[in-house]
Amino acid sequence: MSGVAPRPTGARAGLPTRPRSVPASPWLSAHRANAAGLLVVAVALLLWAASLRGVDLDRMTDLGLASVLPPTYFLAIAVVVVSFAVLVHGRRAAAAVLGLHVVAWVVIAHATTPLLFERLRYAWVWKHLGIVEYILRHEAIDPTIASLDAYHNWPGFFGAAALVAGTAGSDGAATAMRLAPWAQLFFNLLFVGALAFLLPALTADPRAKWAAIWLFALGNWVAQDYFAPQAMAYALALVLYGTCLRWLVVAPTWPRRWASRIPLPWLSRLAERATVGAGLPAVAPAPGRQAAALAIALVLIAAIVPSHQLTPIALIVALGALAVGGCLRTPGLAVIAVVLTVAWNTYGASGYTPEAIRDVLETLGRAEGNLGASLADPTQFGPGAVFVAVVTRATSAFVGLLAVAGWLRRFAAGRLDLPPTLLLLSPLVLIGATSYGGEILFRVYFFALPFMAFYGALLFYPRQARGTGRATLAGLLAVSGALVFGFVFAYFGKDYANRFSANEQAATEYLVRTAPAGSLVIEGNGNYPSRFDHYEQFVMYPLSEWPRAEKTWDRPETAAELAAIIAAEQPPAAYVVFTNSMITGLSRDGIAYLTSLERDVAASAEFTRVWSTPDARIYAPASQPAPP
Amino acid sequence: MTPRLGWPIAIATSALLATLTVVWGGESLVRAGVVGGFLLVCPGMAFVRLLDLDAVAEWTLAVALSIAVLVLASTALLYAGRWSVLAALLLVDGVTVVGMALQVVALIRRGRVIAPPRPVLAATPADERGQGSRGGETG
């Protein structure tokens, strides 16, 4: 039988009916669907590979990488998007074929910059390489170190990365530099794998599962997935959530009991009808399986705690919410997460904890201020950057609205999934707790994204018998298209500022070769490849902080003032570094300041240019002896 | 009949090859592949294979637990002041061998060193509670 079965006679509107059959697509048999899907993925990847030839990055505008990508790149994306939506909706394709579509999108999205860019993007990733290089060189960390001390107090990721790089190549630091550009591809594949592990605990509908993975991959524009502790900790956290949801979470019964006490009859009926945690196991897993799951959860928490500052807090909030909500078979897991985190912050990260606590206390409860710290003022930037900022915010809001709409549709369809609801909402607590250096909004979005994607998918497929019409397919296509549009501008939108040249890297290598230990390095700002080699031997002094607020100290306006700062510091040697990428991405005020200062330094008799390429210039006090 | 010792043997071989490759030295893609494959899969897989999971769960947990083992081994050695590439690798080797030994012991105790093929379909929560994903309205 094909088509939608008639509703059972006498069925009252809104009450559950027996599952209706899914309309079969007579032209799309399983074999045809799989073959067509594989062919489409192959064609899309070929189109993508061809599109990368001849991309001229020098023509990139402030709209980011999207401004120079050819139409074939977007055609490759369109092919994957349409094919995925049709195959998911048709229910004919094998899971492996759908998985290949997700992998194809991840490759197209996250392997593009490693192939196109001359050097590793994101200035802060170069610092992470510097920590790996430090560990490989010293075979140790220094929690009391003056610079980048947080990384030495949460060294888990860096120790693991040093182990991988040091074993994979004879020159570990060079190996790390070769591997790091591919971290985004690696971590995103890990994220989607973790979601494929997690989601079957929440839904038995493969359409909802794959649509959720898809929406997650398209909505992950926030770029917290590069070579960094948070990407690894996040992947482990997703697997931890999956472990809990599959074996340690139970559907609580109290919401149903409370529903009967709701004074509004219609709401009470609606709430009673909702089957709490429908996708969760009704019976407890075998004790051995539970014990194994608990052991896995403990190992994952133990690895997350010494690796990243924020993720354990997010975990504590999430596990605490599950425990308080009566959803955790072993509520002690939340307590263990607290104990491990406190223990690490007290002993392992004792050199840094007072500073971190001070930051949290200063921003505690200031949700508005913490939100504002995450949002740069777009009026200070060019029209392209303003457009990117608007698209970024609109994309985030759109994903949030999808989740809200999906939650409501799921509830109206008779389901109240308490565990994912709690996991969706728990990251919001972080907004009131800390600004996290102005990044908290992005982190909250990132932590909530898997569950926003889950509810976004339920907007289309709230239950197995629903969402079978062509309107659903059209909706999924439209939402996918909107998210792709948002992604290419939000994710690639600042790449004109994240792109560095070999000459800029060479400038830092020049300093490492020639500058004596303890040298003062004054840099326009930190947006260039720096601190990746022997970083602890230099005192770095950025004149302006990038990309958000300007520094509050009295910055030098002229070469004479700069010379006075150097004289007051009395370093063994001093250098002033300007590179082209420092200018990109700055506000109008920042650009005017740095260009004016460099012009003054270049013309000043107090400074001599000691290194110069088209992309990077290094000046030293004229009185300083020339390096050997 | 499927030999259940396949994974323990593969893990042991991988550990041995990775360690020998690192001790031998040199720079090659083979070294990166052998070592990367071992470090990112085997420590976790050595333990996860004890659980009889579906392929997605098995591989996801194997990679996640492998990364966790690398983190914990490196962090312990860093704080003990004993970190070096070789020491960390040997510690990871040791953890892997323990997991592999547990696997072999479990197989022997279950009398499943040589066992019938495992079911293809996975044990998702829906399956565990006796409702396959096609077993009605569970979504």
Image (spheres, helix red, strand yellow):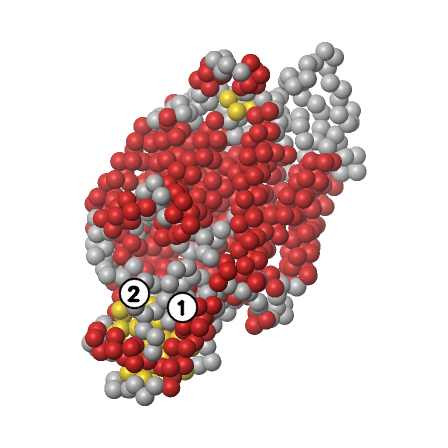
Quarter location, residue A275: top right
What amino acid does circle 1 point to? Pro
Q: Measuring 37% from the left and 27% from the top, which residue is drawn there? A: A323
Can the viewer see residue B100? no
Determine the CA span between mark 2 and mark 1.
24 Å
Across and down, in percent, residue A108 comes to 59, 55
B93 and B58: which is toward the camera: B58
What amino acid does circle 2 point to? Trp
Across and down, in percent, residue A338 comes to 29, 36
Q: Which residue is mark 2?
A: A553
A252 and A158: which is toward the camera: A252
Can the viewer see residue A274? yes
Please tell me whether residue B102 is drawn above or below residue A591 in the rendered image: above
Residue extending farthest to the bottom is A605
Report the quarter where the N terminus of chain A lies: top right
Question: Is tag 2's residue or tag 1's residue first in the polypeptide sequence?
Answer: 1
Please tell me whether residue A101 is drawn above or below residue A603 in the rendered image: above
| Secondary structure of residue under mark 1 | loop
Query: Which chain does the numbered disc 2 sit on?
Result: A
The answer to whether tags 2 and 1 share a subunit is: yes
In the image, taking residue A414 as reference, residue A467 lies left or right, namely right
Residue A529's mark?
A: 1
A133 and A64: which is toward the camera: A64
Quarter location, residue A298: top left
In the image, taking residue A476 as reference, residue A198 lies left or right, namely left
Please tell me whether residue A146 is drawn above or below residue A580 in the rendered image: above
Q: Measuring 48% from the left and 63% from the top, which residue is drawn there? A: A380
Report the quarter where the C terminus of chain A lies: bottom left
